[in-house]
């Protein structure tokens, strides 16, 4: 007998909703994507029709619907707290896109509310369950690079230019550390565990004069609130130290780095905003070697999928992992509220340390259980869907 599927609704019909709806409606046997919700019914209807999803609902209707067990929150960050709270109060399990909320206290409140009501609350980014980061984690756990001594994580963008197109970036949570740095922070936590202490320096975003005039005619200049450039030092509970550089005040051409140093070797990982970037192992007396990926969810489509997964890859694995935890009655051991809180507290700690000049002591802790290796998203040379979903069950 097959698994009893979890009736799920997606909330939000913006840009990222397409990949979620596409993946959740066809990729996981545990998910029954039943409805698309939006503030305006017409917006929900249009998205539902586009992807053949049975129902289009308002948020009130979704909250009141007894059949919907799980909601996936894809609204803009400044709406997250209200939407998540409302759905938890309505008795729904929730998975939310990043950032968790724009205020750490509010995120703590939501984690407590979910616990009080016995509901699962999951938080993106789920790229950390993708093939690259999971392969990196597996290799670290085998001891092939010895004891981890340090890590380096860097990403750059022109965040104010990006905020011309993605308007939600102009508000709280729109700085590069929160918007993109969170993928790096999530990866560091998934690879090395909890961060205990942070020191940092930082700079704000500039006041931005609209550049793409034909799109922004008549718009006033704006400034993304918060710290848009951060150079931070981290101490992990495992004893390793980390060096982080997030620069949102430069150009967009990405010079990303994610490198883990150990007593016996070095691992270079790709862009943690992607699912299947190469993982390179460097050992003494050898040329660097690109390792085979030991896990599925590499962001590639298999022959027969109607469209390529493009940059957004396997988004939705985190939802399926939560759904399996729910169906199996097992603890939510991966992208839990604690994971969301820990990532957010690390980002807030970087800002606080930069603003005060003092070391920030991180209160929260989080350990993410690795996925079992040996399961792949495709089989027969990419011709058929593989069994990677099985790695989300335990
Ligand atoms: N665009 C990306 O590249 C990307 C990638 C990964 C994650 N995300 C995250 O996904 C989320 C959505 O991003 P997006 O790019 O789709 O944004 P978007 O602005 O295109 O869409 C946001 C959606 O949220 C809806 N919304 C806003 N406030 C709401 C409210 N109070 N109640 C109900 N609906 C509300 C809007 O109507 C819209 O449908 C954000 O949290 C973002 O950080 C975006």
Image (cartoon, rainbow, N blue to C red):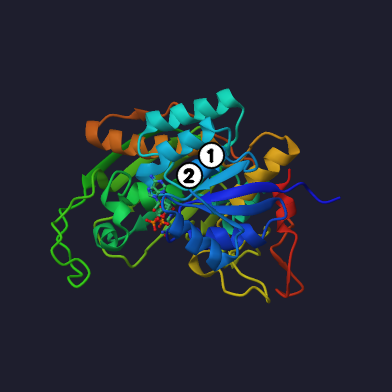
Above or below residue 81? Residue 31 is below
Where is residue 379 shown, x and y percent of the image? 75, 69
Q: Are marks 1 and 2 in contact (CB under 8 Å)?
A: yes
Crowding at dot 2, Cα within 10 Å, few <14 / some 14-19 / many 20+, comes out as many
Query: What is the CA distance from the residue labelled 1 to the residue labelled 2?
Result: 6 Å
> Disc 1, ligand 1: is the CB inside 8 Å?
no
Quarter of the rendering containing residue 148: top right
Quarter of the rendering containing residue 359: top left
In the image, 83: left or right of 30?
left
Q: Residue at x 40, y 30 (%)?
A: 106
Where is residue 114 shown, x and y percent of the image? 55, 29
Residue 372's tag is none
Q: Secondary structure at mark 2?
A: helix
Where is residue 335 shown, x and y percent of the image? 57, 42
Which of the two residues, 178 or 265, is positioned nearer the viewer here? 178
Q: Among all residues in the image, which is located at the extreme right?
A: 1
Residue 63's tag is 1
Q: Residue at x 37, y 63 (%)?
A: 255
Q: Secondary structure at mark 1?
A: helix
Which of the two residues, 183 or 53, is positioned nearer the viewer here? 53
Where is residue 344 shown, x and y percent of the image? 41, 38
Do we see residue 89 in this rendering?
yes
Residue 59's tag is 2
- Image quarter (top left, top right, bottom left or bottom right) of the C terminus: top right
In the image, 41: left or right of 265?
left
> Disc 2, ligand 1: is the CB inside 8 Å?
yes
In the image, 110: left or right of 115?
left
Crowding at dot 1, Cα within 10 Å, few <14 / some 14-19 / many 20+, comes out as many
Q: Residue at x 15, y 67 (%)?
A: 217
Which of the two residues, 178 or 201, is positioned nearer the viewer here? 178
């Amino acid at each position: 007998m097959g698994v009893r599927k979890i009736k799920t609704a997606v909330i939000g019909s913006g840009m990222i909703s397409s990949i979620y709806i596409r993946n959740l409606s066809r990729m996981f046997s545990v998910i029954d994507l039943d409805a698309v919700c939006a503030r305006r019914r017409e917006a929900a209807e249009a998205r539902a029709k586009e992807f053949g999803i049975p129902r289009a609902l308002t948020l009130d209707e979704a909250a009141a619907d007894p059949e919907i067990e799980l909601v996936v929150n894809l609204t803009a960050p400044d709406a997250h707290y209200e939407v998540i709270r409302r759905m938890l109060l309505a008795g729904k399990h929730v998975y939310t896109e990043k950032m968790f909320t724009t205020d750490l206290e509010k995120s703590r409140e939501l984690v407590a509310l979910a616990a009080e009501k016995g509901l699962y609350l999951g938080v993106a980014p789920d790229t950390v369950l993708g093939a690259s980061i999971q392969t990196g984690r597996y290799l670290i756990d085998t001891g092939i690079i010895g004891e981890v001594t340090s890590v380096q994580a860097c990403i750059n963008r022109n965040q104010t230019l990006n905020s011309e197109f993605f308007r939600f970036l102009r508000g709280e949570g729109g700085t590069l550390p929160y918007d993109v740095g969170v993928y790096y922070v999530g990866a560091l936590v998934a690879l090395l565990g909890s961060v205990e202490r942070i020191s940092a320096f930082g700079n704000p975003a500039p006041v931005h004069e609209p550049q793409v005039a034909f799109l922004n005619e008549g718009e006033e200049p704006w400034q993304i609130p918060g710290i848009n450039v951060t150079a931070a030092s981290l101490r992990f509970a495992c004893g390793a130290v980390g060096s982080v550089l997030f620069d949102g005040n430069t150009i967009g051409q990405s010079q990303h780095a994610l490198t883990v140093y150990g007593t016996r070797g070095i691992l270079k990982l790709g862009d943690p905003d992607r699912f299947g970037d190469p993982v390179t192992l460097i050992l003494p007396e050898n040329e660097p070697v690109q390792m085979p990926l030991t896990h599925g969810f590499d962001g590639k489509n298999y022959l027969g999928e109607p469209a390529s997964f493009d940059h957004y890859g396997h988004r939705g694995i985190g939802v399926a992992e939560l759904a399996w935890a729910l169906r199996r009655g097992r603890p939510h051991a991966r992208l839990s509220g604690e994971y969301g809180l820990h990532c957010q507290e690390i980002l807030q700690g970087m800002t606080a340390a930069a603003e005060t000049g003092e070391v920030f002591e991180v209160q929260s802790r989080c350990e993410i259980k690795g996925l079992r290796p040996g399961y792949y998203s495709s089989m027969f040379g990419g011709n058929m869907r593989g069994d990677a979903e099985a790695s989300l069950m335990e």
